[in-house]
Amino acid sequence: MRCTHKVVVLWASVAFVCLPMLWVQAGLMAAGVAPPAAVAAPAVDASAHPSGTLSQVLGSLDADEQIFHQHVVTLTNPFFEGRAPGTRGNEITAEYFEWWFRRYKLEPAFPVAVGEGGEAKRANASFRQEFTAGKQPTVKTERVEIVRGQSRGPLTPGVGFTVRGNSGSGKVAGPVVSVGYAVQGGENNYNTFKEGESLAGKIALVFRFEPLDEKGQSLWSSGNGFTEKASLNTKLRSVMEREPLAVLVVMPPGVDDPRGTMLETTLGTRQGGVQKVPVVNLSLAAAEELAKAGGTTLMDLRKAADAGGGTTELAGVQMEMDVQVVRTDVRAENVGGVIRGRGALAEQYVVIGAHMDHLGYGYFGSRAGPSAAGTLHPGADDNASGAAGLLLAARLLSQAYALLPESAEARSVLLLGFNAEEGGLIGSRYYVAHAPITAEQTYVMLNMDMIGRVRNNRLEVAGVGSAEGFAEWLQESWAKSGLTVKTLPGGSGPSDHASFYRVGVPVLHFFTGLHAEYHMPTDLYPTINTPGAVMVVRSVVDVAMRLATRPGALVFKRATGPSIDMNIDKDDPRAAGTPGNDPAVPSAPVPAADPGAMTGGVRVRFGIAPGDYSGEGGGVEVGEVYPNTSAAEAGIKQGDRITKWNSTMITSVDDWMPMLASAKPGDEVVLQVKRGQEVLEIKAKLRARSGGE
């Protein structure tokens, strides 16, 4: 996904006030790091910051604060490339964690290899746990030509067209038919396709968005953006059902939207299920050239689609396409180190975790939208803050354990840097499925995700209802933390602790709140409250030490109630009345979050956490079923794969989102669910959203 005990609050130092991108001002434009024009810089309340030189500000920090600050600055350096899996920056992040774990004399957490019989050849031999974090598309062949009679007009890759990241491969040639917005069941009986209409043997030209008025705004949303009918995944599904040779995607001319002149990239369009045929984005100029070759204009095609459904074949023009896309595994690594316990408790473990990865160059998950694709997302709070906290905790705990008496009874501590959290808790889910210790040995899991934005001395801790008597027992730690601690009972929520909670491990999630820079290029290190974050880390260490030496079992229980507050923190001085600082509601895909609970405009909550956002397995994998929800009442189980929603096939979470968006409380849906080798039909009655998890 986040002190005031000193005068110093490192939200911004004198040298960095009000900069749209820190590194641009620091002379690092050569690194290619520039914000999109639409991304506003964090507005800074100058009254909250001390005067004085940068050296005075930094010099006033204590040793722990210096170390924490240095880690955050390092991890957000452009050299680390936003730490997304598949980048060299992600690899050196793992190297960085291993280097510090070795420095603090932690033991490696993982076996080095597995023998033929499945047994570990050598336990505790590696700090790394490698896994696959999805697949990355690489375009090997990209040729697109407009053909009219003997005239051929080849388009330039990256200028006239781009191959979409979820495109299929193929070499095709055929006539072009404009299918407008490719919307079925729109307002006022709007339908692009007639009953049984086929696109076999044809190449479909599809407009983004939905019917527009003269201002280029939606005719269906009353000036409020676009409706769920504008979903490209829904359009593609509707088109693909009619079996075209290929699909051309173009922005409608004159649309009042910042994406209107964009040519989306391959990496920025890789989400969702892989299509069966080639799918390319056309630039407006290339699409206009195609329309002109077919005896019309792109605006005329748009106006016809605005006025009503129907398809239009472009007379006398064809397209030839040769698109070959290969998909290779993206390898990533969790990093784990052990501080060995003492006595009879040593075979039990207190796990402390934080995710190391972030969004890289914004090709997925960015709240800044498609225009931010290719722009560095440093992820200072999310989650360089938690990652730095984990490294500081490793230092503090290794020192504390060295001072324990020889006769002390203490559980071992396993510190885990998780990878690929932003892709759907991939690293923590893999760890739980392939852990070197059992769930029974795991006493508790403490997670630091976004701990860097302490405001008004407040900390949020979720999961206090995940063990019997936990909330009461923890009061001692909160009382001496120096923080005002708001507790929530739920143990799921959109971060790595949910993977442990799912298998019956008590959890706590330490979090300092959402903010306007969440999943934005402006999540920069000057926004971090370093002294406040270190107070959080010290509280985590205190809780960990108390749990490590606590006699008796910690009895897991399923908690009811919220596990995260998804509203923007009203204590953020930048939250109100600042352009660009609208509420930080995450955009899909959001790891482990129930899209029905967290996406603006959705009126129902189904009640699952998707287990995978890649779409590679087909359908929506159920990672977790929340109690007292539509899914739980219907009998949906963890591990199920939902492949059909009423009569519509689902290939990915992206496919599913528009279906949730169009549903109403009280609707009854018929689901096709794959459970092991069985295919089941399950009915579910949809409940209204009510906030919470």
Image (tube, helix red, strand yellow):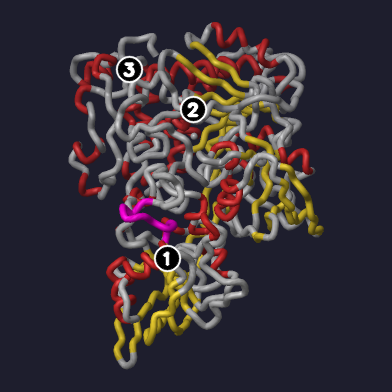
Q: Which residues are magenta?
A: 208-217
Q: Which residue is mark 3?
A: 9
Residue in the picture at 64% in, 37% down? 499
Q: Secondary structure at mark 1?
A: helix
Give percent across and percent down for residue 613. 57, 50
Q: Alpha-carbon distance for marks 1 and 3?
A: 55 Å
Which three-letter amino acid code belongs to the residue tagged 2? Answer: Asn
Residue in the picture at 52% in, 64% down? 236
Q: Alpha-carbon distance for marks 1 and 2?
A: 38 Å
Give percent across and percent down for residue 675. 78, 53
Badge 1 crowding class, 10 Å Cα cut-off, few under 14, some 14 to 19, many 20 or more, is: many
Number of disc labels: 3
Q: In the rendered image, is residue 90 in sight?
A: no
Asked if the residue under mark 3 is in contact with the one under mark 1, i.e. CB atoms within 8 Å, the reply is no
Q: Which residue is mark 2?
A: 567
| 57 and 655: which is toward the camera | 655
Residue in the picture at 47% in, 29% down? 450
Residue 439 found in image quarter: top right
Label drawn at residue 6: none
In the rendered structure, which disc, 1 or 2, sits on the residue that comes first in sequence? 1
Give above or below for 577 relative to 405: below
Which secondary structure dominates the residues rendered in magenta?
Answer: loop
Q: Which residue is mark 1?
A: 305
Between marks 1 and 3 in the image, the one whose residue lies nearer the viewer? 1
Q: In the rendered image, is residue 656 in sight?
A: yes
Between marks 3 and 2 in the image, the one whose residue lies nearer the viewer? 2
76 part of magenta stretch: no
Q: Furthest residue to the bottom?
A: 150
In the rendered structure, which disc, 1 or 3, sits on the residue that comes first in sequence? 3
